[in-house]
Image (spheres, helix red, strand yellow):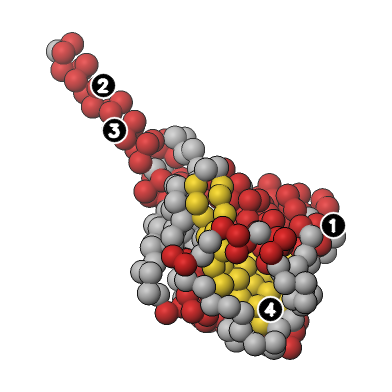
Amino acid sequence: MKVFLLVILGLVLLFLLMFYLGQGRMIYFPRSYATNTPLLEKVTAHSYDSDGKKQWVYLLKRDGAGPPDRVSPDRVSPDRVSPDRVSPDRVSPDRVWWLFGGNGSTALDWVSLVEKADPSANHAFVLFDYPGYGFNSGRPGPKAIFQSVDDAIPVVAGQLALEPEALMNRSGGMGHSLGCAVALDSANRHGWSRVVAVSPFTTMQAMAERSVGGLLSKLLSHHYDNEVSIDALVERGDARVTIFHGDADNIVPYEMGRALAGRDESGGVVDLVPVPRAGHNDIIGALEVELVAILNAE
């Protein structure tokens, strides 16, 4: 009997260990690009290192001045991204939008939306892939993702002929699902004044409880907390956050978006916009007109 119990205990511990070590595969669904991906012709690709792993960030600048040099990642050399290599006559954008996708999306998924932006607005768009996504090395996780954003800043600043501080002053974030957590965290750490959050969850802990139950959720090691981020932005008082949430979302329920908006008791920072009949994966398409209008106007 004792041997039987020890075997059962061992199996339980093995299961818990495998669950703990493998939880990333339940959270992230990275996709890769083919080297001949047509969308690469619509952006410029710039490489940088983050924690010793090679990463790529993609830029699309809508300033009416004609397309920039189109670069395929397998033909980019490191000096392409050096700030001191930037042409002195390059026009800096008035606004820079950083776009962060969901856990099954890639940076280039934003191209179709960004292409509809008005080129006369002189805005630039940073299409961001997480570690392990697209052509990027490494594995996704909160620390790796946030560090990768930080390490991309001087690269993007150099390409847009801006000092990093000036870039941050002109930056705003737009995210979907997991990307909301990245946009909100980045806004707090870098002083961004504008965030658009589409289908945000409250915390990853709450999502884990919905998915695997309260007991197993205690093993979560990938912590994203939008409640903390919203609270910090509300306390700061100089930011504006718009939350769009589909009322038919069965992955991240509408109640989570409403709960986040409710943390702004004064209503001066966070606005909640319900999207009727929109689910989790179709909401970007449903909001195309509204999102393009924001990208144009702000």
In the rendered image, is residue 179 in sight? Answer: no
| Occupied quadrant, residue 100 | bottom right
Quick one: quadrant of the N terminus? top left
Q: Is label 1 or label 4 in front?
A: 4
| Occupied quadrant, residue 121 | bottom right
Quick one: quadrant of the C terminus? bottom right
Secondary structure at numbered mark 1: loop
Instruction: Tell me whether the residue at label 2 lies in contact with that at label 1, contact meaning CB atoms closer than 8 angstroms.
Output: no
Q: In this view, does 93 lie to the left or right of 204?
A: right
Secondary structure at numbered mark 3: helix
| Mark nearer the N terminus (2 vs 3) | 2
Instruction: Tell me whether the residue at label 3 lies in contact with that at label 1, contact meaning CB atoms closer than 8 angstroms.
Output: no
In the rendered image, is residue 156 in sight? Answer: yes
What separation in Å lies between label 3 and label 1 (alpha carbons)?
46 Å
Find residue 130 and name its label: none
Find residue 9 and name its label: 2
Q: Give the labeled residue for mark 3.
A: 15
Q: Is label 4 or label 2 in front?
A: 4
| Mark nearer the N terminus (1 vs 4) | 1
Q: Is label 2 or label 1 in front?
A: 1
What separation in Å lies between label 2 and label 3 (alpha carbons)?
10 Å
Tag 1: Cα neighbours inside 10 Å, few (<14), some, or many (≥20)? few
The three-letter amino acid code for the residue at tag 2 is Leu
Q: In this view, does 210 lie to the left or right of 11?
A: right
| Mark nearer the N terminus (2 vs 1) | 2
Instruction: Tell me whether the residue at label 4 lies in contact with that at label 2, contact meaning CB atoms closer than 8 angstroms.
Output: no
Q: Give the labeled residue for mark 4.
A: 295
Q: Give the labeled residue for mark 1.
A: 237
